[in-house]
Image (cartoon, grey):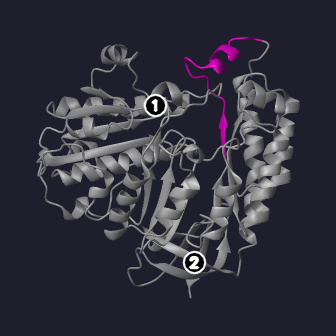
Amino acid sequence: MQDLLFLDKLFPAQRPDRDTTPRSRRYYLWTVGCQMNVSDSERLEAALQNVGYSPAAHPEEASFIVLNSCSVRASAEERIFGKLGELVRVKRAQPDTRVVLWGCMVGPQNQSIFAQQLPMVDYFVSPSAVDAVVALAPNAVYTLDEPALPVANWEHPPVAVHVPIQYGCNRSCAYCVIPLRRGHERSRPLAELVDECQRLVARGARELTLLGQIVDSWGHDLPGRPQLGDLIEAVHAIPGLQRLRFLTSHPAWMTDQLIATVASLPRCMPDINLPVQSGSDQVLKLMRRGYTVARYTALVEKIRATIPNVSLTTDIIVGHPGETREDFAQTLALCAAIRFDKVHIAAFSARPGTLAATQEADPALAVSEAEKEARRRELESAQEQIATEHSANMLGQTVQALVEGESKGKWRGRSPNNKLVFFPHPDDLTGQLVPVRITQTSPWSLQGQAV
């Protein structure tokens, strides 16, 4: 999945400055992690709002606090521990506040340990268990007999919504803790997904992102073994949907049928996230990724030949155990050759229970923290230059921006290639496709004027 996000996210259905809901029925949600965590949090927000809760802008204004955690890297866990430390003051001032630690940090092996180390936490809940979190909200007002409330029950969903189509992962990449935290792959049925997407679009969503740890493998465990391309075609046909995306892909699972499907459907955006993780075959073998650099490069060439103007993003880990300076040089060379639109870069962080943690314990394989950071900065600098050149090519062009909301006095939207676009306009354009002529560029965003 993509890089870490840190969100205090409030959906427009409930604005704290316009809401008089008492503290006893306010929640505060803080999310760390990948898009799957964002999706889980979106579903939780929908469920809480559906049982009478409103969001709070600050934790001390809420009676129910949820931290959605990530354990992919140590830095994410450190952020969560820091946030929990802040909540000690809140709990001391308002002892009735309920605090839930949710997400990938929580596993069956560590709950008793956490209970001793984190006395400010009242409950520990495993990832994606939205209904279990909602059941802990002390003042929920149910209008239905069923406590499990899916994301489709939003009265007013945001413009762009993540829709999880599968949970868990069956692969065993050496560095990854996700299978240990989220379990084996479970695909949601096609009819269920199409029904949810129809309801989301009917209530105002305009862009949907189909989400999975390895999204291309969706359907292999369902009767008839449907493929992701089949689901994309079914969702694409929903009236009112303006844009459709999917992530995260895996080079071993992306098929010719999927590539052709994206190319043939006008509302399926030319935007592919295809993690490579390393430009060295030796490191890819240590990582247990299941492909070679040559195979990855051939796949990229096929995608670019089939999907016009496609945007390619990737994930890379530097400093994985066994990565030499020469291996890292091969990663730099691969990025220079492919020229990704964006690279999510992470310095390797050993996760307990993974093969890579054992590898790093071997002095012959371990990479020093200083060297990891140096490699991360070097790759980041090289990619920033590439991204700057990509953006500069957009100067003077007109792009269709789907407006998601306001940001610092301007409207914020995204281009078909998923570039952030900012522009001024006196009217409320939320949810609309607006042609914007680009007048200023930077590596990670575009500025312009509505045409």
Nearest the eye: 67 or 314: 314
Q: Which residue is mark 1?
A: 182
Q: Position of residue 417 (x, y in %)?
A: 63, 66
Q: Which residue is mark 2?
A: 400
Image side of residue 299 versus residue 11, left or right: right
**Discs 1, 2 touching: Cβ within 8 Å:** no
Q: Secondary structure at mark 2?
A: strand
Q: Position of residue 155 (x, y in %)?
A: 25, 63
Look at the image and give the residue range highlighted in magenta: 343-363
The circle on residue 84 is none
Nearest the eye: 22 or 3: 3
Q: Is residue 363 above or below residue 150?
A: above
Decide if residue 300 is in sight here. yes
Nearest the eye: 329 or 127: 127
Quarter of the image with the N terminus in it: top right
Nearest the eye: 99 or 218: 218
Q: Secondary structure at mark 1?
A: helix
Quarter residue 347 falls in: top right
